[in-house]
Image: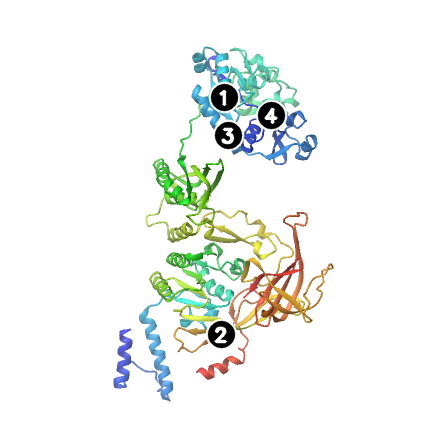
Amino acid sequence: MSGRLTRTIVFWCPDWPVVAAGQAAGHATEVPLALIDRGLVFACSAAARRDGVRRGLRVREAQYRCTGLVVAPYDPVQDSRAFEPVISRIEEITPGVQVVRPGTCAIRSRGPSRYYGGEEQAAEAVIRCLLELGIEGARIGIADGPFAAEQAARATVPGAPVHVVPPGGSPAFLAPLPIGILAGDRLATLLRRLGVHTLGEFAALDAGDVRRRFGADGAFAHEKAGGRDSRSVVPRVPPKLFDADVVFEPALDRTDQVTFGIRATADRFIETLTAARLVCTAVRVAVYTESGEVSERVWLHPRWFSPGDVVDRVRWQLQGGQAIDTGLRSGVARVHISPERMDSTAHHEQGLWGSGPDERIHHGLTRVQSMLGHEGVLTAVIGGGRLFADRQVLVPWGDRPAGDGRAEAEPWPGSLPGVAPATVFPARQPVALLQADGAPVDVDDRGLVTGEPAHFSPTGSARDYRDVEAWAGPWPVTERWWDAEHGRALHRFQLVDTDGNAWLLTLEDHRWWAEGCYD
Amino acid sequence: MNSAIDFFEEVFEHWSMSLPLPSSPPATAREQVAVLQQRISSMQATKLETKTLPTSPALAAVLPGGALRQGAAYSVEGSTTLVMALLAGPSQSGSWCGVVGLPGFGVEAAARFGIELSRLVLVPTPGEQWLTVTAALVDVLGVVVTRPPAGTSDAEAARLAARLRQRGCTLIVVGGWPQSEAVLRIDSSRWTGLGRGHGYLSGREVTVASAGRTGFDRPRRAGLWLPDAEQRFHASARPRPAIVPDLREATG
């Protein structure tokens, strides 16, 4: 039986999500940090744990226990990304690394223990390697099978980071452990109700009975509990790297120079992808400057990236809406391009006669976009809001609209019925509205108009006054009154002047603005 | 074109016509000229094979030929709503529309008036590259709305017109344009729904006037709901304002 078991080394970096988040945000290790997932604490640093923060607490409760707590959202992608360099470094000193989850890895013991002259020595080599990477407090467990080895790693204490369970000793080691560590909450709860509280008690049951009562999952859990974890270590296949990297020495300080410099690399980047029968539909561009600034952004593409498109995205990221020959704040030392999302070319084959007229339109619009910048060509969707400028959401060509269309369907009490203004001023325009006696029209604290509007000037200047033919209002709009920065309170009016033009006016802080014009 | 010229020559040299005339002979010379003009124009229309875009029937009365023509430029003065009314027909029938240089183009109004937003492309600030951007959009889109900057030369306009004819795109210019097929503007408008201190704007009834290309055409007018209470365009059922029949008398 034990011949089938794989002697396994598991190394475990405690609180890996916190380490990764701390690295990304640049926090020191002694900062009390908690990662929040769906309103509950998902992981916390040692400093926070000292103050009583635990996994599963509500955010408010955690902040109450530790007043200086730094709260950040939990990002699983961040975990994996930060763990990637660790795996590559470990793979350099020992082959066959399997990632159990970010922060925990399993290694087949046979090779390394022979090479380093023993299991303890191999474990020490791994710990040394992790310390070189600046990861302190890593624990190692060595046992028969990945499950027992992981439990051995968790059984260590900070003073003695390596726990070796001798060959054949796994059942005895696992026996006193509580049933709750076995995967599957429902199974653990059920077993506890049946009076089975430790792995040893569970393992003592007959395997055939367990399979009949709990099915395949139960049988597998039974094997693990008995130290007969037949899983072997499957080394990961390192994903092929398509990233492209350009280093400029000396650093370049003009956008057009950088653009020219990355052209050949962009060609190569796309060629490598095409050779692997892949197309890239989203690309991550990171620009590192001489002074240490990093600008990172993901660019989407409605179809797939061609080399020219990649060059365009880098250029837009550099110029940020300015002209091509604008000088940069600091010289660009390095540009890193990595594919964020890839797809098989088979899903993006062109039809025998091209992909229809939309392809032509896309090429034309991309040309305009490369002239004017990413935000130069827009498509529009209707979003939520009360003011017309809020309701129209402009999305650069190729990007996906942010919302899910739910905001538009909401009722938005306070929005205007009837005709929508054909012109919505992107920047509101100052106008003037006077009563018949020349005094400005205003709205008092009770929301009543101080006098009937009689004269209107669409530019605000005294020469343009014309008479008011019809008007209605005020319709108050009070938005986000709880937020001092974004909150606004205003009154809206509709008005028709003697020229036959209709206007939508707003009165905010006793000043008149035109929101739109029904021209 | 040639046969039309032959027809003219025959008429003027021999005062006889090879083509059959309407059964009842026209009473006066003036009526005869009118009938001939009508026949010539109808023959020209068939000869040139101009393609038209599906246009809102409400606007048929003010557009030469009754619809927007491909490869032609139209000029609209002082009304974005009228631009949207022109766009709505082609957009609903599947054309892509582009709007260049109108940062205040009201997207919600456009959507309510029937313009398909998924086929609408906005270039709000083309800056100095106005002509290049417009030409690039003319290449690929069906209808392009544009507001030319102040110093647009006739040569630039002519180049763009050549591109339009080649690509079969329709250009709608906000403001003046040297070679426009028709100049449309709103003559008078009457708002409904708004009182003095009550109500809200619910509809608008306008008189749209259009002048033809040469200036020799008779000006066309039409009463139009722009839009009505259900946010749709259609010809107004009310009799036109009294001033319109007077004008027709004077010009006709």
Pointer 3 with pointer 2, Cβ within 8 A: no
Mark 2 residue type: Ala
Q: CA distance from mark 3 to mark 2?
A: 69 Å
Q: What residue is pinned by disc 3? A: A82
Which residue is more in the foreground, B120 or A186? B120
Q: Which residue is mark 4?
A: A187
| Mark closer to the observer (4, 3) | 3
Circle number at residue A132: 1
Residue type, label 1? Glu
Q: Are marks 4 and 3 in contact (CB under 8 Å)?
A: no
Measuring 44% from the left and 60% from the top, which residue is drawn there?
B93
Q: CA distance from mark 1 to mark 4?
A: 41 Å
- Report whether mark 4 lies on the same chain as mark 2: no
Q: Which mark is residue A283?
A: none
Earlier along the polypeptide chain: callout 1 or callout 3? 3
The residue where tag 2 is placed is B222
Q: Is residue B125 left or right of residue A264?
A: right
- Tell me if mark 1 has few (under 14), some (14-19) or many (20+) residues whose alpha carbon lies within 10 angstroms of its own: few
Q: Chain of mark 1?
A: A
Q: Of marks 4 and 3, which one's residue comes earlier in the chain?
A: 3
